[in-house]
Amino acid sequence: MKKFHIKGPVSLRRLIGNLLTQRRIISILAVAAGLLPATGAYGTVIDFTPLNPPADNTGYGGTGSFAGGTSPGGADALYRTIDTLPAGTGVFDPFLTYQHKGVEEGYNSSQGGSGQGFLDTKRVDKWNHDLHVGELLVVPGPDGKGSYYAFELDANETGTGNINRLLSIDDIRIYTSPTDTAGGPGGVGNNASRLNELGTLQYAQNATLGVTANWVLIDSSRSEGGSTSGSGSSDMILYVPTSLFDDAGKTDFVYFYTINGIHDPSNDGPSSSVAGAQSNAFEEWRALNAPLVPDGGSTLLLMGSALTALGFCAGRRGFADHA
């Protein structure tokens, strides 16, 4: 049984309401029991939803990173917003796709069956598949300095009403392993309590599995504005220092796990309360394969070989205020 210890500026009533939308009913009891002594405590939230975000794009009142509570070296990982246009699956080329109403989680693997993968992952193995360290190209940080691996999120919320376009990113954990530890006999599979058996933990947003004190809040409609779905552009990018992967080989598997919706729920996808409900609004992650160069208030994505740069600009647009 997995337990989530949740700390942050969110009401107990709202949080329990969010949790009741997920299918893992047994876990709710453990979460509720752990909530009571922690409701007066506050974790760290990087909030990318205000109407007038800071010019440096680091989130409301924050630095775009978590100073503590991460895995060793994790305080150097950087979170930023981004508007890659267009972002749909055909051009976004995700390695991780997942979907569920309420709380959703998953990690990438080519295993898990045709279409449905482990946990809430979908579209195996075309858009949810194995990834290796050697496939991650080194990119500069948002200030043009440093050496990072970058992972970009395209969150596709329903956009029905002001609240539904928001989504919390409650934990990210990146593991490497010289062998496939996800599928097959003895593999982690659907057992979320065994995630740390995926391999060597290279980065964790929350150092302890099941803790979600460090979380990010995004507006999946920020490019379009207003109460729209988030399918038109990407939303967030995570820069992880390459130095954290120094002990990993180029052929090692990379397992990227994330859980969303604990502090602000996902509003797309099948729900346990609505039999047969379906939606094509998946959350998707891709590994960047070209350097990002900051362009003032805009983001320039250079794609192609070392000799040919094909790019496009996606300007930062106004944020719609949320209820």
Image: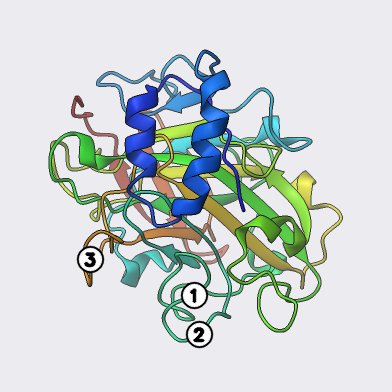
Q: State the residue at coordinates (56%, 35%).
A: 212
- Along the line of sight, the residue nearer the viewer: 159 or 197: 197
Looking at the image, can residue 213 be seen? no
Residue 93 is situated, as x and y percent measured from the top left of the image, at 42, 69
Q: State the residue at coordinates (21%, 62%).
A: 274
The correct choice, above or below, for 174 with respect to 183 in the image is: above
The correct choice, above or below, for 80 with respect to 98 in the image is: above
Which part of the image, by quadrant, shows the C terminus? top left
- Along the line of sight, the residue nearer the viewer: 167 or 40: 40
Residue identified by numbered label 3: 279
The disc labelled 1 sits on which kind of residue? Gly
Which secondary structure lies at badge 1?
Answer: loop
Quick one: label 1 or label 3, which is nearer the N terminus? 1
Real-space CA distance between mark 1 and mark 3, rounded to the nearest whole angstrom? 17 Å
Label 1 crowd (10 A; few <14 / some 14-19 / many >=20) = many
Real-space CA distance between mark 2 and mark 3, rounded to the nearest whole angstrom? 20 Å
The correct choice, above or below, for 71 with respect to 232 in the image is: above
Image color mode: rainbow
Q: Residue furthest bottom?
A: 114
Label 2 crowd (10 A; few <14 / some 14-19 / many >=20) = few
Residue 185 is situated, as x and y percent measured from the top left of the image, at 73, 83
- Residue 198 relative to residue 95: left or right: right
Which secondary structure lies at badge 3?
Answer: loop
The disc labelled 3 sits on which kind of residue? Ser
The disc labelled 2 sits on which kind of residue? Gly
Real-space CA distance between mark 1 and mark 2, rounded to the nearest whole angstrom? 6 Å
- Residue 321 relative to residue 116: left or right: left
- Are dots 1 and 2 in contact, CB under 8 Å? yes
Residue identified by numbered label 2: 113
Residue identified by numbered label 1: 117
